[in-house]
Amino acid sequence: MGFLLELIEQYGLLFVFANVLLEQLGAPIPAYPTLVITGALLGRGEYSAPMLLFVAVLAALIADFAWYLAGRRYGARVMARLCRISLSPDSCVRQTESIYLRFGPASLLVAKFIPGFASVASALAGAIGTRSVKFIFFDALGAALWSGSAIFLGSLFSSAVSDLLDILASLGKWGLVLVAVALAIYIARKWWQRHSFLKDLRMARISVDELDQLLKQGNPPTIIDVRSDFAQQGGRIPGAMVLSDEDISALVINTETDSEVIVYCACPNEVSAARIARKLMQRGYTRVRPLTGGIEAWVAAGFSVDRH
């Protein structure tokens, strides 16, 4: 443990930069505790609070702007990949789109306080064409609020943090083991939350080929698109109806409860579609299935989309 503390003391700013950068790029390495610890060590004079804040904000900006550029170049594919690898089950693309499209770049002010939001929001900002100057302005302010709050807490409770560090240092290698175990528990807990979340949404699904056959039989099912308005700009499956957030809350669709209902989205594992399908089934609809692969699988199979 003493070795870790020496790293923080000797390479405090570099250590903070690397930790924040890696976390904002998507690695499950929490940087907030590091900022709290380095904030508590300000009294030792190795670095100043403004410099510590600058380094943390710079690292966050570099990572976020990388996702911004990726979103601008690759669009929804980047957001889908982020959602797929995220350990936070509530970081699905639709939820992030809903928040960002409602509040705009101002949502970046609190993005880093919401698990799974910051990276996807940065990519989304690039995908929808948010001006880079506006993105950098709000993202920098958000990074300053996030890192500044951690530094302030560390300095405010510096004596308590120092006492804790001294205890861990006195434990030697066992103190380092405790830190490693705590990190492993954090990652395992996030993974289990995601695993449980996806397990709860397991249900029968329909493939794009099966849906195409149903449409050709002349008795088409009710098809529901639960994507955001932004995502729908690329087109919808012919005949699909759209459920807004208000419609989803009310779960009102104009069809019999025993009719075939197909729900699709653009989220990995069909998370949004499966959640709505589950709610519809709870309302008495007996034949509801998410579309495997969502709109991306439909387009990849070469089937037409309605762009009106």
Image: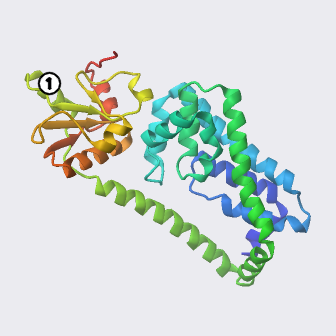
Closer to the camera in the image, 254 or 232:
254
277 and 162: which one is in front? 277
Amino acid type, mark 1: Leu
Location of the N terminus by quadrant is bottom right
Q: Is residue 252 above or below residue 149?
A: above
Q: Is there any visible trace of residue 99 in the rendered image?
A: yes
Residue 111 spot, x, y in % from top left: 60, 46
Position of residue 273 measured from the top left corner of the image (x, y, whole percent): 30, 41
Whether residue 7 can be seen here: no
Q: Residue furthest right?
A: 45
From the top left corner, tell me how far across and down residue 185 is, in percent. 51, 69
Color scheme of the displayed model: rainbow
Direction from residue 288 to residue 268 in the image, left or right: right
User: Pointer 1: what residue?
Assistant: 215
Mark 1 surroundings: few (<14), some (14-19) or many (≥20) residues within 10 A: some
Q: Residue at x 26, y 28 (%)?
A: 241
Q: Secondary structure at mark 1?
A: helix
Q: Residue 108's spot in the image, x, y percent?
A: 62, 41
In the depicted structure, whether residue 163 falls above or below residue 126: below
Residue displayed at 72% across by 78% down: 164
From the image, which quarter does the C terminus lie in?
top left
